[in-house]
Image: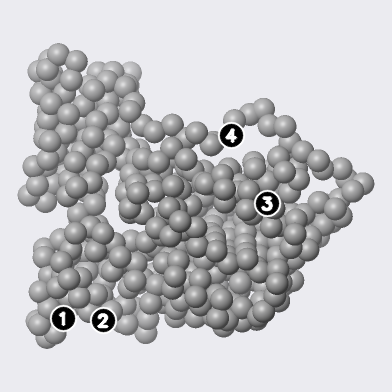
Amino acid sequence: MKKKLLFFILANIVLSVAYAQEIHDLWSGKLHFAGQEMTIILHFHKMQNGNFNCKMDCIEQGIKDMPMTLEKLDQDSLVLDIPAISARYEGVRLQDKIVGTFLQSGYHLSLNLSPGNIGVVRIQNPSEPFPYQTENVSFKNETDSVCLSGTLTYPVTYQPQNASQTPVVILISGSGPQNRDSEIMGHKPFLVIADYLARHGIASLRYDDRGTGLSSGTSRSVTVESNLRDALAGFHYLEKSKKFGPIGIIGHSEGGTLAFMASAKVHPAFIISLAGCAVPGKELIIRQNKELLIRSGATQTEVEHYLKALDIVLTHHQTNHRIVDPQSFVDNLLSEKHIKLSAPLKSNLETVCTSNTPWLHSFLNLTPSIFIEKTKCPVMALNGELDLQVDATDNLTVIKAHLPMSDKHKIEQISGLNHLFQPAKSGLPIEYGTIPETLSPDVLEKMTEWIFCSF
């Protein structure tokens, strides 16, 4: 789903991030917890009134510019408060380092900081000048009165007189508000894709989701269906422009599902589903939580109990029943069903109780196979073997079973890649930010070659 997809579990476990500061601009360090490593970068800006503006990044969690309050700063020590996550950092200055402790939810974690940024370089992010033309454009979803802003990228080979020979794709991101680059943890996968396609003869349109970047509207009322209408508005924009030839769709995660849904309403020349969701929405969320719990070291009993409770909560959301008092609801649920959960998992379940957004309700009731079986164009469906958000076997099996037969289809599970199609070790989301590579070059090559063979 949208790179920051449906992570309903481990909010309290994974969110144990930290902070620290000094007079200089940047301090950074590694926080270790539950076998995981998180890169913490602290920004300190001294304002004209002498006060400090303090913010924190955590690469692995996609946290950027989280505000901190500087409670104490002197020659020997500093104290920072992080209200957003009810945490605190206490450090002592020793020569060129800050040696300290991060405190949250009863945990006392060591976090030592050094001057400078130890963040990971994004080796694939292209930089100007580009050898191709780009254009800022906008198009309107008339039904919802939303104006979407995006970037139209022309290939290096583009000639207006030969427009009909130039394929173009619209890029559709996954769940959650995304900018046109589908940016996550410093990675810009849609920018990387658009750049690669342009250098190999294919145009693209990528856009800010509604309520994000330069697009109007709000993300609070978004549903799967409204995301589809936005994507269709972009598809129709490309049709009306008459600047290109075959129009295809590339979607990631939820965007892959939207590509199949769009094909039931328009006539794309081809579809590329990157980790597209094919199993029913509720089933996908439960499977995600199961995989993430197992990979995070939970026992079989903990996994079974949490998933049993989660299923009940999601059923309430599925029927659009509002949970007024999450704490009482969870307490009663655990008592009635004889379920035992650790404090962090119980707290996380309470958070899930408050998450009944319009989008979640629509996703829980989604059955993608209905749209897959109606797809008439060539389809490429790719999944990473280590994808813990959209399981490769589960989802590719559904696509194979429901997609009408065609020798142009290409359905493949790629070994060693995670949900973002990065080379990974475990596939856990916490790895995303630590991997320099944004998207496997092999996947970029596969997509490009297949596009030219699909029509």
Could you say which is closer to the camera, residue 212 or residue 431? Answer: 431
Numbered disc 4: secondary structure:
loop
**Which badge, 1 or 4, is on the more N-terminal residue?**
4
Task: Say whether residue 100 is visible.
Answer: yes
Type of amino acid at the residue the image marks with label 3: Thr
Q: For the residues carrying marks 4 and 2, which lies nearer the camera in this image?
A: 4
Q: In the rendering, which numbered label is found on residue 312? A: 2
Callout 1 crowding tier (Cα within 10 Å): few <14, some 14–19, many ≥20: some
Q: Is residue 155 above or below residue 338?
A: above
Residues at marks 1 and 2 touching, judged by CB atoms closer than 8 Å? yes
- Amino acid marked by disc 4: Pro
* Residue in the picture at 71% in, 61% down: 248
**Label 2 neighbourhood size at 10 Å, few (<14), some (14-19), many (20+)?**
few
Q: Nearer the viewer, mark 3 or mark 1?
A: 3
What is the three-letter code of the residue carrying label 2? Answer: Ile
Question: Label 1, on which residue?
Answer: 333
| Numbered tag placed on residue 126 in the rendering | 4
Residue matched to label 3: 448
Q: Residue furthest right?
A: 161
Q: CA distance from mark 4 to mark 3?
A: 18 Å
The residue lying toward the viewer, choosing from 78 and 190, is 190
What's the residue type where badge 1 is placed?
Answer: Leu
Rounded to the nearest angstrom, the CA distance separating label 1 from label 2 is: 8 Å
- In the depicted structure, whether residue 412 falls above or below residue 32: below
